[in-house]
Every structure is written in structure tokens, then in C-alpha cells.
Image: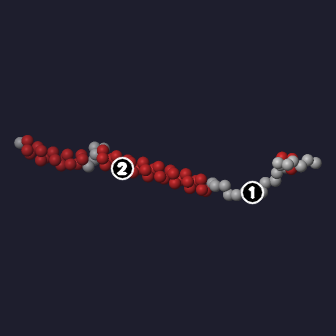
Amino acid sequence: MQRNNKIMSSPVQESTNKDFTKNWVNSSRFLFYLQVLCILSFVLGGCYKLYKSRYKGNPEIEVQSSSKYVPEYK
């Protein structure tokens, strides 16, 4: 009678091994790759944002003559 119980409980045992919450090897691998993907996307997004808002060059700014390195007074 016990032999029949082992045969009957085998499919139940097999399905719990495939469950995400029960199998820590598959779940930890999935969570690791998900974490790497999130970190990579944040880094690439930050680099793109810095690239888009980069300094575009030297604009022509009018400086007062009294505030130059060698000031010119009237």
C-alpha cells in the first residue's frame, strides 16, 4: 500500500520542484539576471542623459572691463 502512495505523490513532488517559489536555484538565477539588467539599464540611461545635456561650447559673454584680470577704469 505504501508503494502506491509513493507513485501517486511523485507528480506532486515533481511539480513543486518546478515552482518558482520552491526552487531557490532557478529563482535566484532569475533574480540575479533581473538585477543585472536593471543596473545596466540605469547606468546606460544615466550616460544617455549626461550625453544629451552636455556642455555645448564657449558662448560669447560680454565681461565688464572693470572685472578683467587687468582692469580698465574710465
Name the colour scheme. secondary structure
Q: 6 or 39: which is nearer to us?
A: 39
Position in image of residue 29 (x %, y %): 34, 49
Position in image of residue 33 (x %, y %): 39, 51
Among the 4 quarters of the image, the one containing residue 48:
bottom right
Q: 66 or 1: which is nearer to us?
A: 66
Q: Residues within 10 Å of mark 2 (few under 14, many from 20)?
A: few
Residue identified by numbered label 2: 30
> Residue visible at 82% across and 48% down?
69
Q: Is residue 18 left or right of residue 2?
A: right
Q: Which residue sits furthest right? A: 74
Q: Are marks 2 and 1 in contact (CB under 8 Å)?
A: no
For mark 2, give the secondary structure: helix
Q: Residues within 10 Å of mark 1 (few under 14, many from 20)?
A: few
**Residue type beneath disc 2:** Phe
Residue 20 visible within the image? no
Q: Is residue 29 left or right of residue 60?
A: left
Badge 2 or badge 1: first in the primary sequence: 2
Q: 5 or 68: which is nearer to us?
A: 68
Residue identified by numbered label 1: 59
For mark 1, give the secondary structure: loop
Position in image of residue 45 (x %, y %): 53, 53
> Residue visible at 8% across and 41% down?
2
Spatial distance from mark 2 to mark 1, Cα to Cα? 50 Å
Q: Quadrant of the N terminus?
A: top left
> Residue visible at 61% across and 56% down?
52
